[in-house]
Amino acid sequence: MAQKISLTRYLVEKQGSAQAVAPQLQLLLEVVADSCKSISSAVNKGALGGVLGTAGSENVQGEVQKKLDIISNDMLIEANEWGGTLAGMASEEMDEILPIPAQYRQGDYLLMFDPLDGSSNIDVNVSIGTIFSVLKKSGTAAVAESDFLQAGAQQVAAGYCVYGPQTTLVLTVGQGVVMFTLDRELGTFVLTQDQVQIPVDTKEFAINMSNMRHWDAPVKRYVDECLAGKEGPRGKDFNMRWIASMVADVHRIMMRGGVFMYPWDKREPEKPGKLRLMYEANPMSWLVEQAGGGATDGRQRILDIAPTKLHQRVAVVLGSKNEVDRVTQYHTQP
Ligand code: AHG
Ligand code: MN
Ligand code: MN
């Protein structure tokens, strides 16, 4: 039988090669993976673990927090604060950055996360996930929000874990995308796919169609052309999927291609989009690019956006390269 390659072994075997992952980063990624195991276990318990329902509080974005949003956030903090690899953390569920408490060893890395993505799906037993992004802090001054405000192109690691029929961890350290499936009997993430590639063409799109009347003309044009099918300008029929968990929608695209859009719309015109740049769009964009796909806000590459705020929002178009290029072209050369 072929040997199982654990996440630890995968990272260790890179040591000594040109693709070596710094030991501190390796440790950090293993601890993040451990937190994902804990979250997966809480998710699996569902009603039996008393983890469903709302927590009765709101986050900085004014969204009602679910119990699992808070539980997952706490699990990530507790696992990562003592490891000595981090200078600070930031999360969708925390208004401000969290510097590593003084009693623990300080490191150079910065960890950002969406602890529980797809919160509206928790109580209905549909796939949800965790998204994370790792940056490096420069200088020796005490960590501040400004240290986190780096463009996505500066990420040193990014990933997500999807809690679905299987728990799958998807990771990049800038050398392509790898997938690990949680083996519950062994308690380890086992390598199940190396060098993931997103097909450049697709017949599948993902967007929340109920917002159609609020969209801008380029997005409406693109979706209208998909809907026109074989008889339309695209000359082929398209299928549509919308899970309402970005992690699950992106995972489908990683596995078989497709395009995912959460565009700017007229509901809240002052906001550039719904999704958050630092811990949703940036890590997902890097993963998608590392798998041969594209990611823009409709006009420019997401990874090139210089952030100004921790919780800033952004429009997102990502997935199969040729479709992302087409949507971007509809915005830039209408
Ligand atoms: P979160 O649960 O972390 O707030 O993120 C939810 C996001 C994203 O996962 C998903 O694609 C989108 O919100 C769904 O939004 P709609 O409910 O507007 O379709
Ligand atoms: Mn999210
Ligand atoms: Mn979330």
Image (cartoon, rainbow, N blue to C red):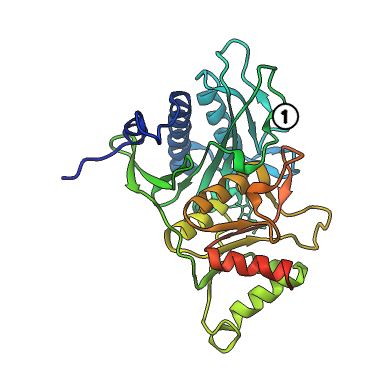
Give residue 155's position: percent from left, percent from top.
Answer: 57, 38
Residue farthest to the left?
1
Residue 47: x and y in percent read: 49, 43
Residue found farthest to the top:
103
Q: Quadrant of the C terminus?
A: bottom right
Residue in the image at 67% along x and 32% along y: 148
Is 169 displayed left or right of 281 in the figure?
Answer: left
Residue at 76% x, 38% y is 309
Occupied quadrant, residue 136: top right
From the top left corner, tell me how far across and down residue 205 is, in percent.
Answer: 56, 68
Residue placed under numbered mark 1 in the picture: 145
Q: Amino acid at mark 1?
A: Glu
Q: Residue furthest right?
A: 270
Q: Kindly tell me whether residue 118 is visible in this rendering.
A: yes
- Give the quarter of the figure containing the N terminus: top left
Q: Residue furthest front?
A: 18
Report x, y in % for residue 206. 57, 65
Q: Circle 1 sits in a helix, a strand or a loop, which is it?
A: helix
Crowding around mark 1 (Cα neighbors within 10 Å: few <14, some 14 to 19, many 20+) is some
Q: Along the horizontal axis of the image, is 321 left or right of 214?
A: left
> Quick one: 330 or 247, which is closer to the camera?
330
Residue 212 in sight from this viewpoint: no
For residue 69, above or below residue 247:
above
- Quick check: 147 above or below 286? above
Query: In the visual, does 39 lie left or right of 138?
Result: left
